[in-house]
């Protein structure tokens, strides 16, 4: 099977003093190696919960997650998690931020450090290695966060609304930029976004979730005829508006 990940009938509820909050109900889908999947759904429906379950941070109450590794084992693949904020530490330089993951995991090997050097060069951050995060633009901070994530060589990248702290203009270029960089690595990505245009322009497939408890309402394979492969051009593809309208309807007319 070429799927890196297979979710089967996942269910999850939060329990606290006020009772039960059902977050996920009977969620099933697979993700192929190298695929970019976008997850969209109403605010509060359970998207972050779903990502936490995939990351192994929460254990599903019902259902199973199967993970396929190249060696046939079913333990968790290396997972990289990028959140809404870049979570760079101001008291560390850019260099000491991007090496932080390796430092924590005690994996500061010469090969890994060489990878970091290469990424710093490729991502145009070499000159900024001794700067503090506050001296970087929003786009550069996200690039630094990406280097820190990629340094651990994850097979699967999970991105939870990673660009939503950026203003609209910056967001367009940064999301296109980061996704191109991830594509080049051949890694698999699951990204949560509330920006439908972003989902259409960067994903191979969009999973639409219902309101809480989230169920898979629809899966939409995205095929755009593009003049070139830039994400900004994707927004001008003739099919773009049809995808947009159909997603809009899915999310506006609940149930
Ligand atoms: P989304 O990311 O789609 O906005 P979440 O997965 O963060 O939604 O949350 C889904 C639902 O679960 C929401 O109603 C939220 O209030 C609730 N929830 C999230 N985390 C907790 C928690 N730790 N304890 C109780 N309820 C929670
Ligand atoms: Mg969320």
Image (cartoon, grey):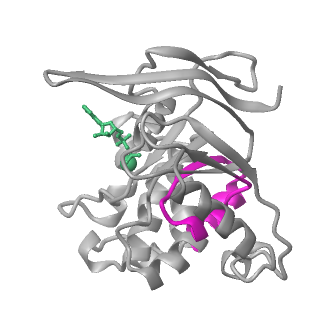
* Residue 74 locus on image (x, y percent): 65, 16
Q: Can residue 94 be seen in the rendering of this structure?
A: yes
At a point 38% along the width and 79% down the height, the residue shown is: 167
136 within the magenta span: no
The location of residue 97, given as percent across then percent down, is 33, 57
Vertical side of 199 occupied by 4: above or below: above
Give whichever of 101, 137 is nearer the camera: 137
Q: Check the image and report above or below for 70 versus 91.
A: above
Q: How many marks?
A: 0
Is residue 122 in view? no
Q: Is residue 203 magenta?
A: yes
For residue 250, which quarter of the picture? bottom right
Q: Going by the image, does 242 lie left or right of 59?
A: right
- When asked about the image quadrant of residue 23, the answer is top left
Q: Residue at x 60, y 73 (%)?
A: 176
Pick whichever, 107 or 184, lies toward us.
184
Q: What residue sits 50% from the left and 50% below the top?
A: 41
In the displayed orientation, state which residue is furthest to the left: 17
Towards the viewer: 234 or 44: 44
- Against 104, residue 117 (above or below) is below
Q: Quadrant of residue 60?
A: top left
Q: Start and end of the magenta stretch?
A: 177-205
Left or right position of 212 against 219: left
Figure quadrant of the N terminus? top right
Q: Which quadrant is home to the C terminus?
A: top right
Coordinates of residue 118 in the picture (x, y in percent): 58, 63
Q: Position of residue 24 (x, y in %)?
A: 46, 30
């Amino acid at each position: 099977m070429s799927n890196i990940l297979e979710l089967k009938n996942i269910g999850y509820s939060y329990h606290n003093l006020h009772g039960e909050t059902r977050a996920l109900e009977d969620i099933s889908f697979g993700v192929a190696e190298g695929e970019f999947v976008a997850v969209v759904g109403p605010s509060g429906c359970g998207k972050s919960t779903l990502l936490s379950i995939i990351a192994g941070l929460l254990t599903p109450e019902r259902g199973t997650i199967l993970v396929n590794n190249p060696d046939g084992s079913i333990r968790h693949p290396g997972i990289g998690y990028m959140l809404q904020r870049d979570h760079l530490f101001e008291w560390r330089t850019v260099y000491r931020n991007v090496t932080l993951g390796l430092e924590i995991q005690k994996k500061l090997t010469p090969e890994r450090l060489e990878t970091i050097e290469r990424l710093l060069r490729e991502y145009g951050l070499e000159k900024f290695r001794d700067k503090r995060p506050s001296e970087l633009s929003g786009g550069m901070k996200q690039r630094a966060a990406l280097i820190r994530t990629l340094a651990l060589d994850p097979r699967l990248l999970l991105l939870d609304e990673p660009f939503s702290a950026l203003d609209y203009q910056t967001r367009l270029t940064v999301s296109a930029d980061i996704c191109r960089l991830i594509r080049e690595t051949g890694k698999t990505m699951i990204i949560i976004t509330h920006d439908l245009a972003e989902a259409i322009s960067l994903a191979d497939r969009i999973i639409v979730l219902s309101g809480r408890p989230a169920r898979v309402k629809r899966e939409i394979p995205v095929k755009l005829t593009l003049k070139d492969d830039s994400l900004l051009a994707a927004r001008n593809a003739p099919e773009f508006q049809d995808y947009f309208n159909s997603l809009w309807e899915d999310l506006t007319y609940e149930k």
